[in-house]
Image (cartoon, grey):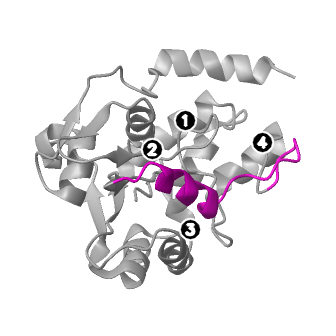
C-alpha cells in the first residue's frame, strides 16, 4: 500500500498502474480501481483531516463521503471485492491523501478487508525533502487557484508542516511495525533512479517487474506559466 506523500510522485505511480504499464515477471498484479478513479484517495479514514479534500468540497463542490450526486463513494469493502475477482498474487493500493489518515485505523481496515499472512504487507511512504516539497506545494497551490492575491502568504503556510515528518513516521511505524517503510524521494537513492522500480523493489525485491515507458504525469510548470495562471485565476469571478 502506497500512502503518499503529496507532491512525491503519486500521480506518476497511479497513472502507470491504472494504464497497466506495470507487470509482474511472474504472477498477477492487480490495481483495483472503481469507475473513473485512478487512485484510492477516496478510502478516507475518519480523523484524517485532509485539507485538500476539504477545499475541493467547499470551493469546487467535490463530493466527500457522499457526493453532490448523492452516490456513495466506494470504500475498502468494494475495492477488496474488486481485487478478489482477479485472484491476484499482488494487490497494489495507492492514495496520497492517506498520508493524513490515522495509521491505527488504516491498519484495522486493511486487516479486515485485505487480510494477509505476516510479512506479506508493505506500506510505503515517499518523503520529499522539505524545501523542495514546500516549493512544489506552492506551485500546485498557484496552479489550481488557491494562492489568492498573495502567493507568498500561501508559501508561508506550506513551510511549516502541520505534523513534523518524524512524528508521522513514528506513528506509522507504531501501527504497522516492520511492514511500514519510509523512502526518500531523492533520485540518487531510488532503485535504478526510478520511482516505480523503487516502489516494487522495496515491496517485492529487485527485478520483479516489467515497465512500459510512459509520458511524465503531472509535470511541474515553470515560473512564467505559473504567473500566467496566477493572473488568470485573479481575473476569474
Is 102 inside the magenta-drawn segment? no
Tell me the crowding category of disc 3: few under 14, some 14 to 19, or many 20 or more residues within 10 angstroms, Cα based: many
The residues tagged by marks 4 and 3 sit, at their Cα atoms, a distance apart of 19 Å
The residues tagged by marks 1 and 3 sit, at their Cα atoms, a distance apart of 21 Å
Location of residue 45 by image quarter: bottom right
Q: Is residue 226 above or below residue 159?
A: above
Q: Can residue 184 be seen in this view?
A: yes
* Secondary-structure class at tag 3: loop
At which x and y percent is residue 55? Answer: 74, 47
Numbered label attached to residue 140: 1
The residues tagged by marks 2 and 3 sit, at their Cα atoms, a distance apart of 16 Å
Q: In the image, what residue occupies the spot 15% across and 49% down?
A: 189
Numbered label attached to residue 101: 3
Residue numbers of the magenta segment: 66-88
Tell me the crowding category of disc 2: few under 14, some 14 to 19, or many 20 or more residues within 10 angstroms, Cα based: many
Residue hosting label 2: 7
Q: Earlier in the sequence, mark 2 or mark 3?
A: 2
Location of residue 155 by image quarter: top right
- Mark 1 or mark 3: which is in front? 3
The residues tagged by marks 4 and 2 sit, at their Cα atoms, a distance apart of 20 Å
* Secondary-structure class at tag 1: helix
* Secondary-structure class at tag 4: loop
- Mark 4 or mark 1: which is in front? 4
Residue hosting label 4: 62
Is 70 inside the magenta-drawn segment? yes
Which of 13/4 is in front? 13
The residues tagged by marks 4 and 1 sit, at their Cα atoms, a distance apart of 18 Å
The residues tagged by marks 1 and 2 sit, at their Cα atoms, a distance apart of 9 Å
* Secondary-structure class at tag 2: loop
At which x and y percent is residue 42? Answer: 64, 52
Amino acid at each position: 500500500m502506497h500512502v503518499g506523500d503529496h507532491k512525491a510522485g503519486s500521480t506518476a505511480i497511479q497513472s502507470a498502474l491504472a494504464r497497466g504499464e506495470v507487470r509482474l515477471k511472474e504472477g498477477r498484479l492487480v490495481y483495483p480501481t472503481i469507475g473513473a478513479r485512478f487512485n484510492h484517495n477516496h478510502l478516507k479514514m475518519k480523523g484524517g483531516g485532509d485539507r485538500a479534500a476539504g477545499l475541493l468540497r467547499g470551493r469546487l463542490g467535490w463530493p466527500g463521503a457522499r457526493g453532490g450526486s448523492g452516490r456513495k463513494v466506494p470504500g475498502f469493502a468494494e475495492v477488496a471485492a474488486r481485487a478478489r475477482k482477479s485472484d491476484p498474487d499482488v494487490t497494489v493500493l495507492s492514495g496520497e491523501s492517506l498520508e493524513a489518515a490515522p495509521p491505527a485505523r488504516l491498519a484495522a481496515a486493511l486487516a479486515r478487508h485485505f487480510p494477509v499472512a505476516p510479512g506479506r504487507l508493505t506500506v510505503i511512504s515517499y518523503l520529499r525533502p522539505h524545501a523542495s516539497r514546500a516549493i512544489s506545494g506552492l506551485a500546485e497551490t498557484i496552479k489550481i487557484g488557491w494562492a489568492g492575491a498573495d502567493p507568498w502568504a500561501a508559501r508561508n503556510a506550506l513551510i511549516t508542516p502541520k505534523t513534523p515528518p518524524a512524528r508521522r513516521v513514528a506513528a506509522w511505524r507504531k501501527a504497522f511495525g516492520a511492514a511500514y517503510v519510509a523512502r526518500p524521494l531523492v533520485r540518487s537513492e531510488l532503485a535504478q533512479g526510478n520511482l516505480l522500480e523503487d516502489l516494487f523493489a522495496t515491496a517485492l525485491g529487485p527485478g520483479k517487474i516489467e515497465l512500459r515507458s510512459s509520458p511524465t504525469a503531472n509535470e511541474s510548470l515553470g515560473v512564467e506559466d505559473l504567473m500566467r495562471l496566477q493572473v488568470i485565476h485573479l481575473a476569474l469571478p
